[in-house]
Every structure is written in C-alpha cells, then in structure tokens.
Image (cartoon, rainbow, N blue to C red):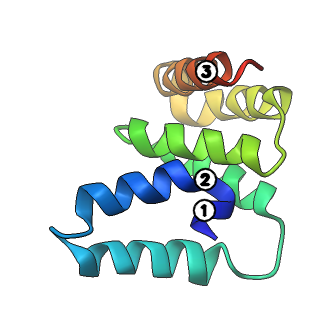
Amino acid sequence: MLRHVDGERVAENLQRAYGEFAPEFLDALVGFAFDDIYGRPGDLRHRELVAITSLATMGGCDPQLETHVHGAFNVGLSKQELLEATMTLIPYIGFPKALNLLAILKRVCESRGC
C-alpha cells in the first residue's frame, strides 16, 4: 500500500535510511500505518486528507507532510481540494501552521507541475 500511495521513492528512501539501523521500526511503520490502516476498505483520498490535516495540526512534521501531499496527488486529490482543506484549517490551527502547509503544498505543486 505504501508504494501505491507514496510511490517507490518513499519506500526506497525509508528502506535506505532505516532498513539496517531499525528494521523493526520500519516494519511497524509500514505494517501498521500502510497495511493495517491504509489497507482497510475505504477511500484513500480521505485517508490522505486526514493524514495531511493531522500532520499540519501537529506541526514539526514537514518531511512527513510533504510525503503525504505527494500521496494525496497520487491518489487523485486536486490542488484545489488541498487548498480548500488548508483554508478550512485556519481557524483551528492558526495562520502560521496553515502557511507552513501552504508552503509545502506550493513546493510539491511546483515539483509536480500542477
């Protein structure tokens, strides 16, 4: 499921970064988050939207947020849908965290040509 949502790049980067150092952690991350949670019946678009809004709310998760923005595009969310989600978050997370999400969304859009 990880490769379907986030592509080969993320799976390979995770394996390269943590495969030898902490294989049990990597197995737990991929097994739980992507097999057990993302693999449940349902809409991957909604799962990515929940992941993005949760990470934006937490703050300090820029690499994960960027990965999930890419994943959102990979499963069919549009730039406009992600911009609307960012607007909806403002009263709940404030402008600084919403601006952070906006900057990541802009960077990902520029890299993908959207």
Q: Is residue 48 visible?
A: yes
Q: Residue 21 bears which disc, if any? A: none
| Residue bearing mark 1 | 3
| Residue bearing mark 2 | 7
Query: Helix, strand or loop at disc 1?
Result: helix
Residue 77: x and y in percent read: 82, 42
| Residue bearing mark 3 | 111
Q: Residues within 10 Å of mark 3 (few under 14, many from 20)?
A: few
Q: Earlier in the sequence, mark 3 or mark 2?
A: 2
The amino acid type, in three-letter code, at marker 2 is Gly
Q: Residues within 10 Å of mark 1 (few under 14, many from 20)?
A: few
Query: Helix, strand or loop at disc 2?
Result: helix
Measure how far apart labels 2 and 1 are at the Cα level. Answer: 4 Å
Q: Residues within 10 Å of mark 2 (few under 14, many from 20)?
A: some
The amino acid type, in three-letter code, at marker 3 is Ser
Give the residue drawn at x 48%, y 52%.
Answer: 10
In which quadrant is the C terminus drawn?
top right
Query: Helix, strand or loop at disc 3?
Result: helix
Residue 23 lies, with reference to residue 106, above or below; the image says: below
Q: Is residue 56 visible?
A: no
The amino acid type, in three-letter code, at marker 1 is Arg
Residue 20: x and y in percent read: 19, 70
Residue 7: x and y in percent read: 61, 53
